[in-house]
Amino acid sequence: MSDTPVRPGRPSVRKLPQLPPAVRGLSPASALRLSPPSDTWFKPALSVVVASAVPHLTLLALGRLDLAVYSMAGSLCALYGHGLPYARRARALAGVVLGMAAGLAVSLVTASLTGSTAVLIAVGALLAAVQKVLCDATRIGPPGHVIFTFVSSAALFAPQRLDQIPGHLALTLGAGAFAWLVALAPALVRREGPERRAVARALEAAAVCAADPGPRNGNAVDPGPRNRRAAAAAVHAAWRCLLDCGRPTPVRRSLERLVVQAEAAFAAPRPGAGAADPERLRAWAARTRGRGTVPMPPPAPGTADELYGIDAERAVLRAREGRRAARRALLRRLGPGSPLLPVAVRTLFGCALAGYLCAALGVGRPYWAIVTAASLCQANLTLSWNRALQRTLGNLLGVLVFAAVLPVSRIGPLALVCCCLFFGFAAEALITRNYWLGSVAVTPMALLVLEFGGAHPAGELIGDRVLDTVLGAAAGFLAATLVTNRRAAGRVERALDATDRARAAAERTGADPAAAPVERDRARRTLTASLVELREAGDTAAGEWWQRALPEQRLLAAERAGHRTLAATAQRRGPTAHAPSIGAE
């Protein structure tokens, strides 16, 4: 590492020329390419099966399987929050259940008051837009807004009377409460499980970064941008998880130390030396992810409490002012100047267009087209194009699977329930590989749900689903193309300014020998968070069309300057360079 002292101030990158926006190509191959499965794919898959099986089998025993569509709305809440620590998961899932019930209530009341297809489609499109904005603003997901839209849109086109609504909502809330218990049940066995996984990911990402330091320039080491960004994002996610996990425990104290080691490794990697040894980081990650004791790395010198201010930061976040600041940040994301507004308009326009096209062609279930269009409304046009290909291919293959499995499902009600549970598990098991692969299982499950209320002609179901898929995908992508998101570039500018401020603050505290460790490490974490936000804003803007030129060189220079500051302040802080081996712990 270079011995150049840290100098506070902004980097001189504002005068760099701007380049044209780097729009990613719309490549079908990259959109359909399979990824490795998620390390926690089985958690939402098992949770949704358990959360659905109990209500379904109960209704089957009572002879009221026709009500399963309402209990299923609550059961699907078990898909959410599996990356959150249990303390925050409990609050988030409670909000998901209430949000699901609220959307369902609006749909049921509307369906009971009017039979106008035009009104129902308009309400469905409006609900989809609101659900999209709220899910993006609160960052709940995956699966995000699509499940909410699926439930509320389907309920709009189901026959309904006002006197039935309380009972149907009670079923949803009851199933949602059971899903809440299912999602939180692992806390009884391993209450630090989410934190351990988040920290293990940070250690693994830091190990990749330390193993590939990139080109050397004198004594300075500049790791490859992709590895460094991935490590910064993983470390930031681990800090957020630890801040949200509740009161400290001995295990969480060890996890906090491990995140410090990961942060030091990606900020100032020195292969083969101490904490930056990739093999050491991987070994720590394996032990952290397992069920045994968490490794206890030595504290980095220069900190009195060995926790780098996380307790003080947690106290600030939980204080009244901290909660007010969080609410203000949420309102800014929902306000008139929000970058989410163009995406909401896209969702509204695309869902309405898809629904009215299907209604004009005489399709009996236009809500499928609404859900398809809603699923296409992603952060930028490139992602929307990818999702259009994935959704179309997955649904078309899914109707073939449905045609093959339909005779089995009609053997009896129990066979129908088992088929739905199987496809629910398969969808979550496959969707982390690629969205289209998960859609192959989601499509037959959605079609089989209609069988709860009685058998339908197979040809009609298949024909409607194919037509709805094609029209919904076309309408959704057309909306993404016509409704421009010019605020994406403005978000990059704001992220650049925030990164500059965070970098200057980190440099000031890093250069001030009187600065408290709490202030120093809080400034470092703020800088890391701003770099993650900057990269996310840049990636979103790079996939948009019809916008002004992006400051690509300034963006890259700000990232490099930020990472250099992290490296320099890590050297000032004095990360452990002589940690004992794991066997010596």
Image (cartoon, rainbow, N blue to C red):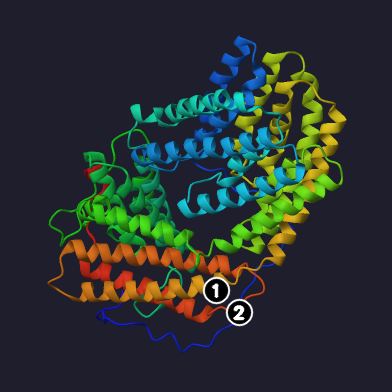
Q: Badge 2, how many Cα within 10 Å: few under 14, some, many 20+?
A: some
Looking at the rendering, in which quadrant would you find the N terminus?
bottom left
Q: Say what secondary structure mark 2 lies in.
A: loop
Residue 212 in sight in this render: no
Residue 88 location (% of width, % of height) = 36, 42
Residue 183, picture quadrant:
top left
Establish if 64 lies above or below 228: above
Residue type for callout 1: Ala
Which of the two discs, 2 and 1, labels the residue nearer the N terminus? Answer: 1
Q: Residue at x 65, y 55 (%)?
A: 347
Residue 273 relative to residue 391: left or right: left
Does the residue at mark 2 contact the one at mark 1 (Cβ under 8 Å)? yes
Q: Residue at x 39, y 86 (%)?
A: 12
Q: Say what secondary structure mark 1 lies in.
A: helix
Establish if 375 lies above or below 227: above
Residue 239 location (% of width, % of height) = 33, 53
Residue designated by label 1: 489
Q: Of 171 and 21, which appears nearest the observer?
A: 171
Q: Of 396 and 73, which appears nearest the observer?
A: 73
Residue 410 in sight in this render: yes
Residue designated by label 2: 548
Q: Residue at x 37, y 83 (%)?
A: 11
Residue type for callout 2: Arg
